[in-house]
């Protein structure tokens, strides 16, 4: 089954599945022996087969050292990692794990008996899933022994509020969203081993935000993220984040901004360079200096600043002719390298393989020059419509069509996992996301463009545009005020019209009455006249 976007509902995993996959539960721990004992007791009660479950507890330098209690799952072992940090401890456990699925679990999270099975039914449905359970935060006193009824003992408890809000506002993460990876929280998340092998281990250098950063790399590797409400667990006490959210966010955001391009709100600086750009543009550097320069310079001058250009050529074997440079057969390549080797947003590469951590890759033929907003507009189209590939038709010749391609790395990674032998990769991308063709002319691509403006000119143009926007805003406000005034006057006119209609109706009734009275009077007068005439005639006789 091929999931489109992040709409995992198409998988429909069977609750009565036959367990076959092995799961490795990795628990990093530093101190807290009393909580660890309860966690291991909870794992010992799981309904998922014990013979398919291994538990690896990683003591991250505790003093005194941690120990395994009597109540623990049969295939449990304790290892030690002296390198401090939860990321390092998890990586140590990952290196020891042998399961088909890696289940991250914190040492203060007690799973309910069916939690692991609820995770694993999804992994039996597809090998490219990251499943997160629902945590509830309990402030109940720690029991000496894990109670039989976890709900009765640990409730009332608080839900994982921000996670619930994320799931609710995205219809369970099935709507088009750039950040489904935010669901990857290490307290109770499971991931297919194949995905972790593609994404790589935890980043041990990050101080905070390791879970989210790894979630981002899992997405780039093709993951689908699944929230599973039946995989319930109790967090023993509040988290540090619940008590110090603003301080933690301050530290975390300062580090993850370099690693997670999807967090656009952390990259508002107009001229910053980031470790992982939002888009990488691949340009063939072997076709001639002038065409390459026109394309690259236009890209660097565009409104999408969070960008890196990869110019592909044989740079590792390129030699310069220092005696007769004008007759150098490699002159065009030498010019390209000389022009861009010190530009920080240009990378000279020998392969057209893009960085898998970059969200989008634009493959653009040299000599075709994007407009100032072309790349930004294509990215907006791909992002809003959840597309895996946007083909840009540039030209049609006798030899065929000339096109650029904007690829979303995450969907291409998933397509590579799912493609059958001989199947076109683009066809799979179309199934898991979507493909469209657009006109290059519509999006501002041409073979010639105006010279890029200098920063001073751009600054002045921006000020002029801002002033014009302010003027138009004031004009719009004036028009809105006029409309309100006209509406008030129209309401008065409507009110007056209603009153006039009522008065006219009353007058009409009065006139009708007068007409009836007049008619009656005329009839009476006629009768009197006729009577007088008869009397006179009678008297004459």
Image: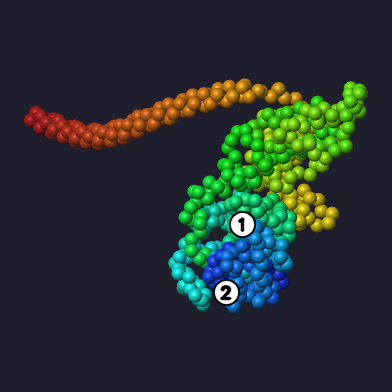
Residue 85, numbered label: 1
Against 156, residue 316 (above or below) is above
Residue closer to the observer: 516 or 346:
346
Q: Secondary structure under badge 2?
A: helix
Query: Is residue 122 shown left or right of residue 152?
Result: right
Q: In which quarter of the image is the N terminus?
A: bottom right
Q: Is any atom of residue 115 visible in this view?
A: no
Residue closer to the observer: 81 or 393:
81
Q: Mark 2 points at which residue?
A: 41
The answer to which quarter of the image holds residue 284 is top right
Against 128, residue 371 (above or below) is above
Residue located 57% across and 25% down the image: 462
**Residue 128 picture location, percent across and down:** 70, 59
**Residue 421 picture location, percent across and down:** 83, 56
Q: Quadrant of the C terminus?
A: top left
Against 513, residue 34 (above or below) is below
Residue located 48% across and 61% down the image: 238
Q: Secondary structure under badge 1?
A: loop
- First in sequence, mark 1 or 2: give its number: 2
Query: Is residue 481 shown left or right of residue 442?
Result: left
Mark 1 vs mark 2, CA separation in Å: 25 Å
Query: Is residue 223 shown left or right of residue 34?
Result: right
**Residue 244 picture location, percent across and down:** 48, 52
Coloured how? rainbow
Residue located 67% across and 31% down the image: 302
**Residue 93 picture location, percent across and down:** 67, 63
Q: Is any atom of residue 167 visible in this view?
A: yes
């Amino acid at each position: 089954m091929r999931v489109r976007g992040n709409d995992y509902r198409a998988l429909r995993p069977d609750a009565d599945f036959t367990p076959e996959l092995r799961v490795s539960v990795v628990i990093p721990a530093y101190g807290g022996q009393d909580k660890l004992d309860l966690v291991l007791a909870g794992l010992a009660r799981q309904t998922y087969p014990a013979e398919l479950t291994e538990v690896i507890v990683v003591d991250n330098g505790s003093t005194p050292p941690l120990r395994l209690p009597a109540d623990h799952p049969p295939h449990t072992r304790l290892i030690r990692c002296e390198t401090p940090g939860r990321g390092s401890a998890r990586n140590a456990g990952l290196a020891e794990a042998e399961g088909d699925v890696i289940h991250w679990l914190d040492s203060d999270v007690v799973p309910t008996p069916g939690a692991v099975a609820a995770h694993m039914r999804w992994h039996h449905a597809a090998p490219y899933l990251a499943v997160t359970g629902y945590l509830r935060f309990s402030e109940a006193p720690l029991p000496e022994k894990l109670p039989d009824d976890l709900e009765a003992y640990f409730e009332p408890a608080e839900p994982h509020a921000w996670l619930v809000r994320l799931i609710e506002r995205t219809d369970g993460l099935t709507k088009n969203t750039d950040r489904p990876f935010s669901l990857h929280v290490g307290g109770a998340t499971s991931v297919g081993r194949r995905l972790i092998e593609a994404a790589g281990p935890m980043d041990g250098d990050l101080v905070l935000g390791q879970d989210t950063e790894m979630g981002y790399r899992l997405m780039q590797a093709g993951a689908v993220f699944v929230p599973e409400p039946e995989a319930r667990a109790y967090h023993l006490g509040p988290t540090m984040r619940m008590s110090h959210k603003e301080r933690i966010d301050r530290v975390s955001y300062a580090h993850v901004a370099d690693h997670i391009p999807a967090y656009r709100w952390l990259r508002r600086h107009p001229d910053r360079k980031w470790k992982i750009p939002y888009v990488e543009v691949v340009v063939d550097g072997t076709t001639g200096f002038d065409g390459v320069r026109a394309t690259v310079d236009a890209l660097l001058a565009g409104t999408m600043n969070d960008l890196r250009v990869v110019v592909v050529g044989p740079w590792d074997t390129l030699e310069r002719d220092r005696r007769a440079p004008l007759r150098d057969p490699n002159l065009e390549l030498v010019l390209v390298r000389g022009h861009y080797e010190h530009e920080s947003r240009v990378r000279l590469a020998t392969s057209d393989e893009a960085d898998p951590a970059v969200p989008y890759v634009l493959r653009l033929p040299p000599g075709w020059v994007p407009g100032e907003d072309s790349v930004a507009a294509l990215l907006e189209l791909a992002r809003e419509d959840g597309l895996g590939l946007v083909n840009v038709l540039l030209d049609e010749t006798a030899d065929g069509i000339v096109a650029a391609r904007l690829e979303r790395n995450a969907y291409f990674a998933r397509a590579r996992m799912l493609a059958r032998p001989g199947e076109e990769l683009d066809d799979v991308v179309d199934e898991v996301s979507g493909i469209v063709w657009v006109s290059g002319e519509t999006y501002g691509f041409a073979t010639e463009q105006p010279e890029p403006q200098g920063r001073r000119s751009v600054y002045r143009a921006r000020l002029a545009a801002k002033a014009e926007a302010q003027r138009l805003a004031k004009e719009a406000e004036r028009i809105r005020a006029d409309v309100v005034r006209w509406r008030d006057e129209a309401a008065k006119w409507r009110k007056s019209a209603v009153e006039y209609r009522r008065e006219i109706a009353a007058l009409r009734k009065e006139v009708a009455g007068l007409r009836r009275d007049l008619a009656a009077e005329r009839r009476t007068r006629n009768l009197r006249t006729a009577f007088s005439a008869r009397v006179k005639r009678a008297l004459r006789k």
